[in-house]
Image (spheres, rainbow, N blue to C red):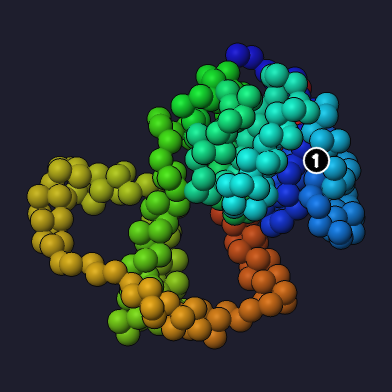
Amino acid sequence: MGVIFVAVVTIVGAGVIGVSWARLFGSAGWEVRVSDPRPDLRELVARELADLSVTATADLAEAATGADFVQEAGPERVEVKEQMFATLAAHTRDDVVLASSSSSLMASVIARGNPAADRIVIGHPFNPPELMPLVEVVPGPRTSEVTADRAVEVYRGLGKLPIRLKKEIPGFVGNRLQKVFNDQAAYLVQQGVIDVRDLDDLVRASLGLRWATVGPFESGVLGGGPGGMRHLAEHVGSQLSFEIGAPDPARMGEVLDAVEQAYGTGESAYERLADLRDGRTRAVLKPLGWTDPATADSRPQ
């Protein structure tokens, strides 16, 4: 399709994801508008995005008018998203992509009854969007090819790895995998097999490190040696026949208590953990072949 000539992005929602999207787009040279009804919006923008070209307004229609791309990051409630996307549809041009950061709601649900359904697509990041390379691009049945293609191109221009799913499914791919993994982690803690900190360290020192360099299928190829994944499945894999169990929902409070005891809660604990995560993430992006948006030249052409 060639280069998309875009300059203005409207970010809907000023929570953790929305602010991170704003920082990513702003660092790439876009003019950023952030819209959120929260009363402290201007103070938040001045504090979190002070070095970027960002305007803040509670008026969604005003923020959307004249935008070249919209990235919604509002509450994960379908009735709220339907209302927001109705406003976005009415106040944007017919060629403007309306992307949702939703982590579970499908485009077909968000777009119900919306006259701009062909422009609505899921652009689901992993947190924080400014650092994590992945954006899952998930079209709904009524999403146009042009919309999906433009979303992919915009995210790629921001230094992201946009992966377009072949069809929509609740939770998409990243969160479905994450849910299965997290359920097993909670089960193992509930069963007294391992504690919270040791499980996190175990994952960082094994699967996390491995999957940061090769994915699970490629890992299977390597695990089987010259015989590849087929050899692994027929030998070691054939013995992995144990029942994995499932966490008891009634006992999830025990797991949450253990997590809070291990890592703390509140603003100071969050900031400390986020700084540690972001520092480590930045440290491994370049060696792993990813682009750090803070140093990339990804300005819109």
In what quadrant of the picture does the N terminus appear? top right
Would you place residue 122 above or below residue 254 in this image? above
268 relative to 228 in the view: left or right: right
The picture quadrant where one finds residue 85 is: top right
137 relative to 33 in the view: left or right: left
- Mark yes or no: residue 9 visible: yes
In what quadrant of the picture does the C terminus appear? top right
- Mark yes or no: residue 189 visible: no
Asked whether 292 or 25 is in front, the reply is 25
128 relative to 209 in the view: left or right: right
**Residue 157, image x and y in percent?**
66, 30
Which residue in the protein does label 1 denote? 60
**Residue 274, image x and y in percent?**
65, 66
Measuring 10% from the left and 56% from the top, which residue is drawn there?
238
Measuring 38% from the left and 78% from the top, which residue is drawn there?
250
Element type at marker 1?
Answer: helix
Would you place residue 94 above or below residue 121 in this image? above
Measuring 87% from the left and 45% from the top, which residue is drawn there?
57
Measuring 86% from the left and 59% from the top, which residue is drawn there?
39
Asked whether 279 or 116 is in front, the reply is 116
Give the farthest residue toward the front: 113
Q: How many labels does the image show?
A: 1
Would you place residue 80 above or below residue 94 in this image? below
**Residue 4, image x and y in percent?**
69, 20
**Residue 127, image x and y in percent?**
59, 54
Disc 1 crowd rating (10 Å Cα; few below 14, some 14-19, many 20+) is many
Residue type, numbered disc 1 = Leu
Asked whether 284 or 120 is in front, the reply is 120
